[in-house]
Image (cartoon, rainbow, N blue to C red):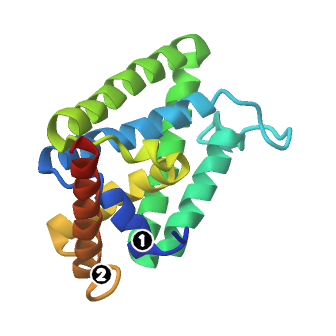
Amino acid sequence: MGMFDLEEQFAFYGAYHSNPVNILFHMMFVWPIAFTALLLLYFTPPLFGASPIELWDQSFLVLNYGFLFTVIYALYYVSLDRKAGSLAALLFFMCWVGSSALGHRLGFSLGWKVALASQLLCWTGQFIGHGVFEKRAPALLDNLAQAFLMAPYFVLLELLQSAFGYEPYPGFHASVKAKIDAEIKAWKDKKQKKNS
């Protein structure tokens, strides 16, 4: 699977998220997971030994691992699709700024507790979505890196498609749906053979 093939990436992730309740759970929990991961990364040291960026007389934006991950995610999303990818990149940068401000305000001793509680809640919700509603293990068990990288973009693209009929290009949704249906059928056939 090509990392920059949007159809393949979306179809892989979508094959694990076909149940509407599971999709809703992911829409509710994926971005908070990203936000609180960035909150944890706020407490990493600056990458270049530089001082924080001065903004509104507050020193809270640090070019650290949170910033590095934000840039990587943003560039990846824009490379997949300029329109939705740019929106996803903007949202990721907003998460970085927001998590940095929250980390600065809370400090390490409280910040990691807030992040941990949020991570536990959100991951529990996602595993319930998979176990109870999807009845299929999460994508991260088959491809950890792809699932973590694609999840925020997937739920945004799913929301844009559902709410506004957005497609990166004409025929995208139909093509991806056919691939998802084929992948789900292959998984069910494999599962049935294994159980027989």
The percent position of residue 33, horizontal first and vertical second, equals: 42, 36
| Residue at the disc numbered 2 | 172
Per the image, label 1 sits on a secondary structure element best described as helix
Mark 1 crowd level (few <14, some 14–19, many ≥20, 10 Å Cα)? some
Residue shown at 17% from the left, 65% from the top: 162
Which residue appears farthest toward the top when viewing the image? 109
Q: Is residue 132 left or right of residue 4?
A: left
Which of the image's four quarters has the C terminus?
top left
Q: At x 77% / y 37%, what residue is drawn?
A: 46
Residue 38, above or below 2: above
Q: Which residue is mark 1?
A: 8
Hey, what amino acid is under mark 2? Answer: Phe
For image coordinates 31% across by 26% down, the residue present is 124
Q: Eyeballing the image, is 173 above or below 120?
A: below
SS for dot 2 = helix
Residue in the image at 46% along x and 41% along y: 34
Q: Is residue 52 above or below residue 173?
A: above
Farthest-out residue, bottom? 170
Q: Nearer the viewer, mark 2 or mark 1?
A: 1
